[in-house]
Amino acid sequence: MAFLTKGKKEDLRKLAWEMGLSVGEDLRILDIKHLIVNSEKYEEASIKNLFTNIIEERLEKIKNDEQAAEQERKKAEQAEEEERKKAEQAADLERRKAEMDFELQKLKLQLEAKMSGVPQIKKTVNSKENSSKPYAPKRNSYDSRFDKTNQAGPTSSFNRGDKLKTDDRSDRPSVSCYGCAVNGIWGTACADSGASHSIAGETLYLLLQKEGANFQKTQITMSLADGHKSEVEVYTTSVVIRLEERVIRTQLIILPYAKGNRTLLGMDFLQKAGIVLKPETSQLVL
């Protein structure tokens, strides 16, 4: 009878069922053992072998179930890994496509700049016309290198109370500049003495976005030539502008609601770069 202690209650119930005995759900283990031992069919040797087989079948079933569960787990992990790889490949393909589109857009801007027939930039040193302009700094205050002060950060900032002034007079000096780069992006920009601040056009704004430029949201007052003033929400960002031999860090204003507008180099940039506009010849004098 000692061999009956090796099994579980479910093994004893199955043994009793194999012996043709009726076992109630509420019977305890000890009651089931007494029922088996006191049965007319009880013969210790044969019952012991039968009980051993019942236990082995249960253990084998547990083992098979565990193996099946492990196989299902591995299949699920494999399927998850395949999905992850597909997602990574799709993301990599999308990234490569975005990079290609970005490079094509830059190339398009460069080609447009070369084919647009924009005027050339005229360089002069210590000219009288330079000194006649009150906003033009001395030539030796800037050189072709980017000084440490400019490299450290922006040389101008925007506050809520700043005013953006524009002048739409037809006689104002406004010329296109070939060979102008913003954060390494080459293209065409317009130098405009009627604008108090430099403004990034829609295309430049999108390119700076793709390059991960840091934009700050702020409120400014925009003043037009007709005297109309309005409070507008704009973005600002600090960029490095290269024009001929000049490399100047400048704060750009972005008008997010504007569509198709061009990039303007305003008085803030012109003054820091020491540039004088020569309207009669549509040239920049450096």
Image (cartoon, rainbow, N blue to C red):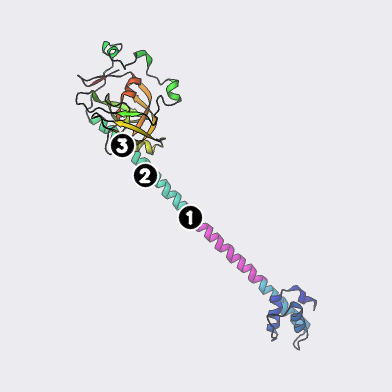
Tag in front: 1 or 3? 3
Q: Nearer the viewer, residue 89 or 159?
A: 159
Q: Residue furthest bottom?
A: 40
* Cβ atoms at labels 2 and 3 below 8 Å apart: no
Disc with the residue nearer the chain's start (2 vs 3): 2
User: Dividing the picture into quarters, in which one does residue 73 lie?
Assistant: bottom right
Residue occupying image coordinates x 42% and y 48% = 91
Q: Amino acid at mark 3?
A: Thr
What secondary structure prevails in the magenta region? helix
Q: Under tag 2, what secondary structure?
A: helix
Q: Which mark is residue 97?
A: 2
Label 2 to label 3, Cα distance in Å? 18 Å
Which residue type does callout 1 highlight?
Glu
Q: Residue at x 29, y 34 (%)?
A: 109
Q: Would you name the residue on which mark 3 appears?
A: 203
The image shows residue 105, relative to residue 156, as above or below, that is below
User: According to the image, label 1 marks what residue?
Assistant: 82
Gap between marks 1 and 2, in whole Å? Answer: 22 Å
**Image marks 1 and 2: residues in contact by CB distance under 8 Å:** no
Q: Which residues are magenta?
A: 59-84
Task: Name the image quarter holding residue 206.
Answer: top left
Q: Is residue 275 left or right of residue 36?
A: left
* Number of residues whose C-alpha sits closer than 10 Å to that of mark 2, classed few (under 14), some (14–19) or many (20 or more): few
Residue 173: where, in percent of width, then height?
23, 23
